[in-house]
Image (cartoon, rainbow, N blue to C red):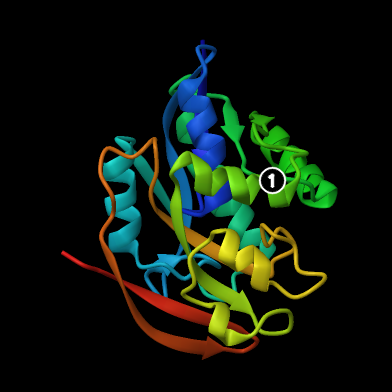
């Protein structure tokens, strides 16, 4: 059985990839690894509070390794922080990192090269799947997620805070990927078949930073 650490954003793609690994007899998921922006105390890019990240990991029953990076983090700083974190997994006998990427070949090539430099292999459990079908199956399987961030160059701010379901698919403008794989939006999963319990959340205020609109999510309890 191959030990795997899941590159974890808290969003739907990584969650479905994790769910498949947890069901696989060939893999043992030893934990989640997440980059956190130190200045904001939130999941990088997705903008979700650390307390919700911690509750999510607890509901999944998996250890969480947070990799702290500064705001406006340089690529060199990011790679150095990741190298330090990955070294711990290598020492513990885990040399495979799983990602939830769906189709961006340039991102996959970057991840492959970075992991290889750190003695790690890569795994892409949901690679190549049709993104509209992905969202439909996501809803049908019982996962529940909310959009935490939108790129205002591609989507209206009103999409921040919406649930990921068929109603969302119907309202997305032409050219926007159903999974937001091109960076149109990011999400937070708060329930699903691999959760021992839902992560209770309530919507907070919307905040705009540059071209991104973040919908704050607050712990409900």
- Residue placed most toward the observer, 67 or 166: 166
List the single residue furthest toward the left: 221
**Quadrant assignment, res 213:** bottom right
Residue at point 63% right, 53% down? 79
Q: Can residue 15 be seen in this view?
A: no
- Residue placed most toward the observer, 115 or 76: 115
Q: Where is residue 189 in the image (x, y as percent from the top left)?
A: 43, 54
Q: Is residue 21 above or below residue 173?
A: above
Residue at point 36% right, 43% down? 64
Q: In this view, does 162 lie above or below 210?
A: above
Residue at point 35% right, 56% down? 53
Residue at point 28% right, 50% down? 198
Q: In this view, does 110 lie above or below 157?
A: above
Per the image, the residue denoted by label 1 is 133
**Quadrant assignment, res 218:** bottom left
Q: Position of residue 82 (x, y in %)?
A: 56, 48
User: SS at mark 1?
Assistant: helix
Q: Position of residue 208 (x, y in %)?
A: 53, 89
């Amino acid at each position: 059985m191959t030990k795997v650490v899941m590159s974890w954003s808290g969003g739907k793609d990584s969650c479905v990839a994790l769910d498949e690994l947890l069901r696989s007899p060939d893999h043992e998921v030893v934990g989640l690894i997440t980059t956190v922006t130190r200045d904001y105390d939130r999941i990088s890019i997705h903008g979700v509070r650390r307390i919700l990240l911690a509750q999510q990991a607890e509901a999944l029953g998996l250890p969480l390794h947070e990799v702290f990076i500064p705001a406006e983090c340089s690529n060199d700083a990011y790679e150095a922080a990741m190298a330090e974190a990955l070294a711990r997994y290598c020492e513990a006998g885990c040399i495979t990192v799983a990602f939830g990427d769906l189709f961006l070949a340039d991102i996959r090539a970057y991840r492959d090269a970075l992991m290889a430099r750190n003695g790690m292999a890569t795994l892409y459990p949901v690679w190549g799947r049709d993104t509209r079908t992905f969202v439909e199956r996501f809803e049908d399987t019982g996962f529940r997620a909310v959009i935490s961030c939108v790129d205002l160059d591609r989507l209206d701010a009103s999409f921040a805070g919406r649930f990921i379901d068929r109603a969302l698919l119907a309202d997305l403008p032409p050219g926007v990927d159903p999974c937001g794989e091109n960076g149109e939006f990011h999400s937070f999963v708060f329930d699903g078949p691999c959760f021992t319990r839902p992560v209770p959340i309530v919507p907070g205020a919307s905040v705009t930073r540059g071209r991104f609109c973040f919908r704050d999510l607050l712990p409900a309890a």
